[in-house]
């Protein structure tokens, strides 16, 4: 029996619809090649709708999205809408209300893509960051007193409970076991490293570290465990990225190191991410913004959106199809593109999508 997946598509703002069109093209090609079906339904959530109706997300939108197998997002951000309104009202709201407690960020250098790291190749830059996505300092626990006076006090706290920590770590161990370097034939052992700051943030990372080793010893003895301070991690991401396999960390630290990782893999034009609820609806997106100055010019790089689509298929269980898309992207970057930059690729946006689809 052929599997059919219902996908909610939010093309979003700026160049979002353009890159999503190419991602959709590639996904449908992969579906045909690998024997499953995708039913895609578009939603117009974004800046244009907000300016037209005053609504960020209409009533019932989140409940409607729960009925889909996954969400495929283009970009959120409109030049005529104050920063924060769309991001909080769409991205953060969906992440929290759909309990997408994992942010999954592969950091992979593709063939032919330039990296600012000297003498590093695709073999050296090939790891994954798993960021806890529902807790920590970003949840807004805290407050302000005596605002705008000489005695103003601002407090924002990093708060985690064991339930949040445990479910994130268990996902990370499972991911390392299934997709780590040994699983991909690139190492002798799958390794999961906890990134933290145990020497300063002693309460929070005491919890993280204890649970990390408890779960590892009891349930994942086949996965090697390591610990790295976050500042050292940043140095090694530049100096020795080949050391890494799968990293797991908190919300804030993950936000920081994944942007650094994106730059080492060639920039936002190739970086894709997933907001994952393993028991519910997950959302996949290119990391870069809406790039409004390029809207409608057919020159934006769609590869990050295409890679996000591959991540979506992998999470849905279509692992071979996901690999087929990733291999096709490698062929395009390694043999066809002059650059990843808008207007400098040597091809239009739609032609890049055609190239990837053609190589599947």
Image: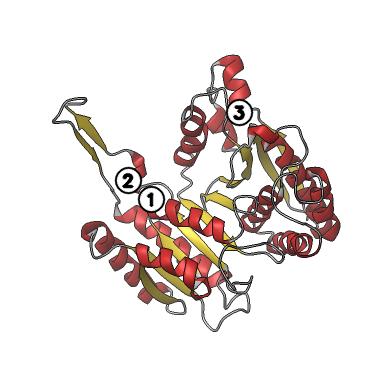
Residue 342: horizontal and vertical position, in percent?
71, 45
Query: In this figure, which residue is indicated by the disc labeled 2?
Result: 137
Element class at badge 3:
loop
Closest to the observer, 206 or 76: 76
Quadrant hosting residue 339: bottom right
Q: Residues within 10 Å of mark 1 (few under 14, many from 20)?
A: some
Q: Which mark is residue 252?
A: 1
Q: Which mark is residue 44?
A: none
Query: In this figure, which residue is indicated by the disc labeled 3?
Result: 45
- Given contact means CB atoms under 8 Å apart, are the residues at marks 2 and 1 in contact? yes
| Residue drawn at x 48%, y 29% as measured from the top left | 83
Residues under labels 3 and 2: Cα distance?
A: 27 Å
- Nearer the N terminus, badge 1 or badge 3? 3
Q: Is residue 342 left or right of residue 53?
A: right
Q: Is residue 258 above or below residue 71?
A: below
Element class at badge 2:
helix
Residues under labels 2 and 1: Cα distance?
A: 7 Å
């Amino acid at each position: 029996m052929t599997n059919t997946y219902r996908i909610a598509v939010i093309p979003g703002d700026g160049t979002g619809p353009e890159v999503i069109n190419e991602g959709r093209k590639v996904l449908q090609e992969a579906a045909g090649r690998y024997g499953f079906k995708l039913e895609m339904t578009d939603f117009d959530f974004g800046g244009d709708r907000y300016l037209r109706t005053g609504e960020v997300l209409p009533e019932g939108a989140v409940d409607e999205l729960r009925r889909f197998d996954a969400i495929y997002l283009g970009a959120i951000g409109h030049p005529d809408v104050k920063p924060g309104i769309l991001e909080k009202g769409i991205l953060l709201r969906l992440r929290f209300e759909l309990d997408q407690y994992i942010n999954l960020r592969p950091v992979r250098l593709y063939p032919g893509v330039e990296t600012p790291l000297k003498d590093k190749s695709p073999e050296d830059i090939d790891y994954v960051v798993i960021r806890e996505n529902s807790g920590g300092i970003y949840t807004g626990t805290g407050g302000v007193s005596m605002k705008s006076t000489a005695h103003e006090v601002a407090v924002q706290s990093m708060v985690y409970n064991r339930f949040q920590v445990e479910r994130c770590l268990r996902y990370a161990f499972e991911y390392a076991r299934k997709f780590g370097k040994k699983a991909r034939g690139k190492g002798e052992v799958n390794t999961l490293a906890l990134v933290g700051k145990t020497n300063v943030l002693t309460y929070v990372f005491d919890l993280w570290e204890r649970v990390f080793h408890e779960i590892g010893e009891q349930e994942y003895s086949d996965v090697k465990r390591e610990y790295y301070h976050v500042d050292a991690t940043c140095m090694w991401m530049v100096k020795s990225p080949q050391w890494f396999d799968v990293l797991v960390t908190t919300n804030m630290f993950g936000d920081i190191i994944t942007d650094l990782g994106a730059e080492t893999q060639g920039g936002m034009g190739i970086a894709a991410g997933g907001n994952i609820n393993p028991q519910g609806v997950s959302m996949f997106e290119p990391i870069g913004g809406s790039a409004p100055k390029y809207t409608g010019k057919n020159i934006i790089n769609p590869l990050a959106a295409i890679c996000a689509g591959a991540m979506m298929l992998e999470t849905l269980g279509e692992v071979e199809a996901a690999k087929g898309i990733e291999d096709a992207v490698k062929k395009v970057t390694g043999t066809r593109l002059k650059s990843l930059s808008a207007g400098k690729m040597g091809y239009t946006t739609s032609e890049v999508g055609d190239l990837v689809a053609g190589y599947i």
